[in-house]
Image (spheres, grey):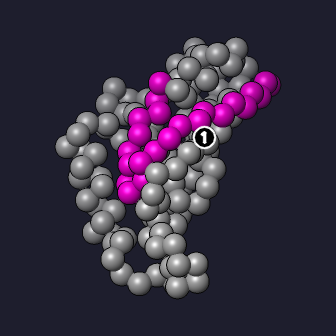
Amino acid sequence: MTVTSKTIQLSTKGNCDVVDITSEVAREVSDSGISNGTATIFITGSTAGVTTIEFEPGLVADFRDMWDRVIPQNIPYQHDRAWGDGNGHSHVRASLLSASMTIPFINKRLALGTWQQIVLLDFDNRSRSREIVVQVIGE
């Protein structure tokens, strides 16, 4: 069993920015020297999350709209009262989505469906520098 850990750095726009990170994660898996196993993708910070989605403009817009319907920005949040930074909705959205996910890979290729990409969602109310930890485990 071998384990490697790498980080991916990127800048986001905030406000439900959806960023396709599939190629970066695939590169870390390929470069790991591990043929079969799992890759855990973890976003540091409490106002962003990761998931898979078909990364096409219509669905990305639908996905952003869904977050506005389910967890609106323009309602009171206790976090905003405590800290005054106006991003209470960002924390709630990120905790619902999740900060991590695990994807199997076979022969150094992620086991993703044809229309399935790995995306980072930045829910914060401002642009951010983000760090994604990719831990590859296998043999």
**Residue 87 placement (x, y as % from top left):** 48, 69
The residue segment tinted magenta is 1-23
Indicate left or right for 133 with 90 as reference. right
Q: Quadrant of the C terminus?
A: top right
**Residue 25 placement (x, y as % from top left):** 55, 28
**Residue 80 placement (x, y as % from top left):** 51, 79
Q: Residue at x 74, y 27 (%)?
A: 4
Q: Residue at x 80, y 25 (%)?
A: 1
Which residue is the site of mark 1? Answer: 132
Q: To which quarter of the image does residue 134 belong?
A: top right
Q: Compared to 121, does 2 lie above or below? A: above
Q: Nearer the viewer, residue 124 or 1?
A: 124
**Residue 64 placement (x, y as % from top left):** 30, 55
Q: Nearer the viewer, residue 127 or 4?
A: 127
Residue 81 among magenta residues? no
Amino acid of disc 1: Ile
Q: Nearer the viewer, residue 60 or 101?
A: 60
Q: Residue at x 46, y 73 (%)?
A: 86
